[in-house]
């Protein structure tokens, strides 16, 4: 089938990476919006969490879709990483190396696997916690713990590094590459990762420093 042949091609795999990457960024945006309620108050965050989990079917379907997208992103990403190591640098790579963050690009599989580890820890900690304990209490206890909070901060640093190249690479795959816009694109590859880093890593810092003591 043409679709299978297309996905088997190099451009097909890159398109899968770009598309799944975009979907994961959209998920991050929705997750960031929900987590931002932590900075408002305990009641606002708990209300958000209760409303979310009052629709279990939607949560399950959404979670399964997310895991499928995440698995596809990681699987194709690892394949492309090892494939690229076996071939010489292409003309495309030479032309774009000036723009991309070489450290971020070279560490993509490692930051990706670290994010995967974080995902397992995150799901285990917040999904399989005691049912009789409000999620707001669990969040405060977990993220207020020094080692757990530090792990979260390091994880989101890894995410920011991953995104700094991933976002740029996604735009290149979608053909968004023009001298008129490249300066703006370069800025976005810093602004977007920093936005997620500040918002998400700020939550454990919020509790670890005592700013969230009244939460």
Image (tube, helix red, strand yellow):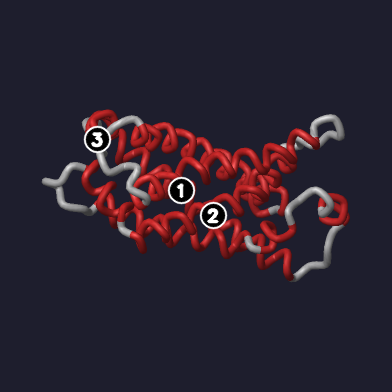
Q: Depth-wise, is mark 3 or mark 2 nearer the camera? A: 2
Q: Residue 206 in the image: state x and y as whole percent.
A: 38, 45
In the displayed structure, 107 sits above or below 9; it is below
Frontmost residue, 30 versus 151: 151
Tag 1, which secondary structure? helix
Identify the residue at horizontal 46%, vertical 48% (top origin). Answer: 201
- Compared across the picture, whether 24 is left or right of 132 comes to right
In the displayed structure, 159 sits above or below 24; it is below
Which residue is the site of mark 3?
53
Q: Which mark is residue 157?
A: 2
Frontmost residue, 99 versus 80: 99
Residue 2 is drawn in which quadrant?
Answer: top right
Which residue is the site of mark 1?
201
**Could you tell me how many numbered marks the image carries?**
3
Q: Residue 153 in the image: state x and y as whole percent.
A: 46, 55
Quarter of the image with the C terminus in it: top left
Q: Earlier in the sequence, mark 2 or mark 1?
A: 2
Question: Do the residues bearing badges 2 and 1 touch, measured as CB atoms within 8 Å?
Answer: yes
């Amino acid at each position: 089938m043409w679709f299978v042949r297309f996905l088997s091609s190099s451009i097909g795999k890159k398109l899968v990476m770009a598309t799944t990457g975009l979907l994961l960024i959209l998920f991050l945006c929705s997750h960031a919006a929900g987590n931002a309620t932590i900075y408002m108050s305990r009641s606002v965050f708990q209300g958000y969490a209760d409303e979310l989990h009052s629709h279990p079917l939607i949560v399950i379907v959404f979670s399964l879709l997310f895991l499928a997208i995440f698995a596809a992103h990681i699987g194709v990403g690892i394949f492309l990483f090892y494939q690229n190591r076996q071939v010489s640098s292409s003309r495309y790579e030479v032309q774009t190396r000036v723009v991309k963050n070489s450290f971020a690009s070279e560490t993509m599989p490692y930051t990706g696997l670290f994010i995967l580890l974080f995902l397992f820890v995150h799901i285990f900690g917040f999904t399989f916690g005691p049912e009789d304990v409000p999620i707001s209490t669990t969040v405060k206890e977990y993220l207020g713990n020094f080692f757990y909070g530090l792990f979260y901060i390091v994880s989101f640093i890894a995410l920011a590094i991953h995104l700094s190249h991933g976002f740029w690479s996604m735009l290149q795959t979608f053909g968004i590459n023009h001298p008129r816009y490249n300066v703006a694109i370069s800025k976005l590859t810093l602004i977007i990762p920093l936005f997620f880093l500040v918002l998400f890593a700020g939550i454990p810092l919020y509790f670890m420093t005592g700013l969230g003591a009244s939460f």
